[in-house]
Image: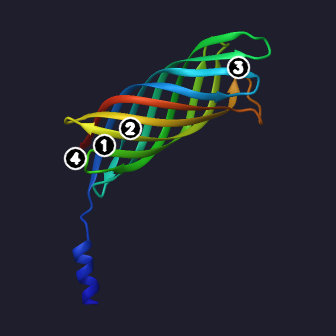
Amino acid sequence: MKKLLILFCLFSHPAQAWLIVEGNVGYGISNEWEKENYADVQYDGMVVNGRLGVKVFNFLIFGGEYSWSDNYFEYMDNSSGIGYKIPSPRTDYGVFAGIDLPIMLRFWASYYIQSELKMDNLNGTKLNGFGYGAGVGWTFLPFVSINGEYRKYEYDSSVGDIALGSDDKLTGNWFLISVGFYADLL
C-alpha cells in the first residue's frame, strides 16, 4: 500500500485548465467535389475561423469552432452543357479536439455538426450537411500561428434549385492554409 501511495504522489499531476482563443484568416482550395450530373466542380475562396476552448494537462485541447467562408461555387451542368460561377458563402459550426505540443506545434481533429452552403443566385438555394477535418498549426512569435487543414464535407439536404434527394449527395474535399492569432489565457 505504501508503494502505491508513493507512486501516486510521484506521478500525480496538478490539474490545470487554460482558456484557448484562436482566430485566423486563410484561403481554401477545393480538390474534388462530386454530384451526379455535374462536372468540373470547384469551390475556392477566403475563410475566417474562430476556436474557443480549454487546454487541460498542459497539452490536451478541445472546444467549439466557427468557420465562415466567402467562396465561389463553380460547376458545369452535364445535361445542358452550361457552366456556372455562383457566390456561395458557407458557415460551419463544430467541435474540435487535439494536442498542443511544447515545441509550439498543434494537431487537431474537427467535426462540423452543421455546415450550410448558401447560393443566393439560385433562388436562395441552401445546402445543409456536415463535415470533418484534420489540421496542424505552428505558433511562432508570441501569438502568430500558421495553420494547414484538410476538410471533407457532405451535403445531403437542400432547399431551392439544386435538389438533393435521399440518395443524392454533394461531397467535397477542401484544403485550407491560414495565418492567425493563437493564445493560451489564464
Give the residue drawn at x 45%, y 30%.
Answer: 176
What residue is disc 2 on? 51
Q: Is residue 59 left or right of residue 71?
A: left
What residue is disc 3 on? 160
Q: Residue furthest right?
A: 79
* Upstream in sequence: badge 2 or badge 1: 1
Secondary element under disc 3, as helix, strand or loop, is loop
- The quarter holding residue 178 reads top left
Secondary element under disc 2, as helix, strand or loop, is strand
Give the residue drawn at x 27%, y 44%.
Answer: 104
* Upstream in sequence: badge 2 or badge 3: 2
What residue is disc 4 on? 186
* Upstream in sequence: badge 2 or badge 4: 2
Q: Is mark 2 in CB contact (under 8 Å) with mark 1?
A: yes
- Amino acid carrying label 4: it is Leu
Q: Residue furthest left?
A: 142
Check the image and report above or below for 70 versus 108: above
Q: Nearer the viewer, mark 2 or mark 4?
A: 2
- Amino acid carrying label 2: it is Arg
Q: Position of residue 185 (x, y in %)?
A: 24, 43
149 or 65, nearer to the observer = 149
Give the residue drawn at x 31%, y 54%.
Answer: 59
Secondary element under disc 4, as helix, strand or loop, is loop
* Upstream in sequence: badge 3 or badge 1: 1
Q: Is mark 2 in CB contact (under 8 Å) with mark 4?
A: no
Q: Position of residue 124 (x, y in %)?
A: 64, 16
